[in-house]
Amino acid sequence: MRIRRRKWAKKELEEAKFYIDDPTIYKGKWKEKFNNENNKIYLELGCGKGTFIATLASNHPEINFIACDMIEAMLGLSKRNIEEKYLDKNLEINNLYLIRMNAERILDVFSDEDKIDRIYINFCNPWPRGKHKKRRLTHTRQLEHYKTFLVQGGEIYFKTDNDELFDESILYFEESGFEIIKKTYDLKKDLIFEDIETEHEKMYTEQNIKIKALIARLKRDVNN
């Protein structure tokens, strides 16, 4: 998604206590960073404008959340949307960190000591050309990375409008030792999980494009 530069984003992000520009310093220490080791940690890859994570995290103060993107303007919009949602509910932002990260370098940020329980991937770039498919966030190469810090039995929640990406992702998950425990080719008809509508989802639904979704679970006998 192309987005114009927001001149205010850098300054506002630097002033936000829940924003981390260099998350590599917390690799293996995310439990300590949240300072509540009994709470699960959920991660969103590619948070965009942040409406999804703002709603989800404010709905579940008993869970810790990390949301990432690599574009400063997007992160700035996420920061504002998160603050607005928490303010509306009269909540402090103490269960969510917004981080700047390229998903291809995810192993610089997370390790097996971080014990992430769930990953959300919503409407990622489908990279349809053959030579670019390895860049997909659901590609086997990426899934192998996630396995190093997902807990055994950890889950990935995936949504997309793209039929090819969805069908090929199912194969990626199976090749990487995940089991598909739920899936649908029409999320509005078969609500397989708590569906918080993203900006992309609203746009595609208005165009009568069906949303595909699945939950993949890391098999407990798979070694990280």
Image (tube, rainbow, N blue to C red):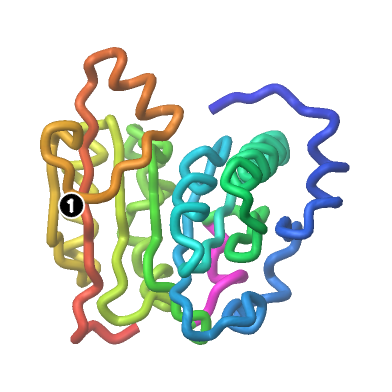
Whether residue 63 appears in magenta in the rendering, the answer is no
Q: Quadrant of residue 91?
A: bottom right
Tell me the residue at 45%/65% (across/down).
42
- Near-viewer residue (73 or 41): 41
Tell me the residue at 72%/56% (across/down).
19
Label 1 packing within 10 angstroms: few (<14), some (14-19), many (20+): some
Tell me the residue at 52%/38% (across/down).
51
Quarter occupied by the C terminus = bottom left
Q: Is residue 128 left or right of residue 187?
A: right
Q: Is residue 74 left or right of residue 107?
A: right
Q: Secondary structure at mark 1?
A: helix
| Residue 60 at x, y percent in the picture | 45, 60
| Residue 181 at x, y percent in the picture | 13, 61
Q: For mark 1, what is the residue?
A: 170
- Near-viewer residue (99 or 41): 41
Q: Can you name the residue that lies furthest to the front here?
A: 90
Indicate whether 126 appears above or below 87: above
Determine if residue 142 is in view.
Answer: yes
- Near-viewer residue (201 or 107): 201
Give the magenta range: 104-111
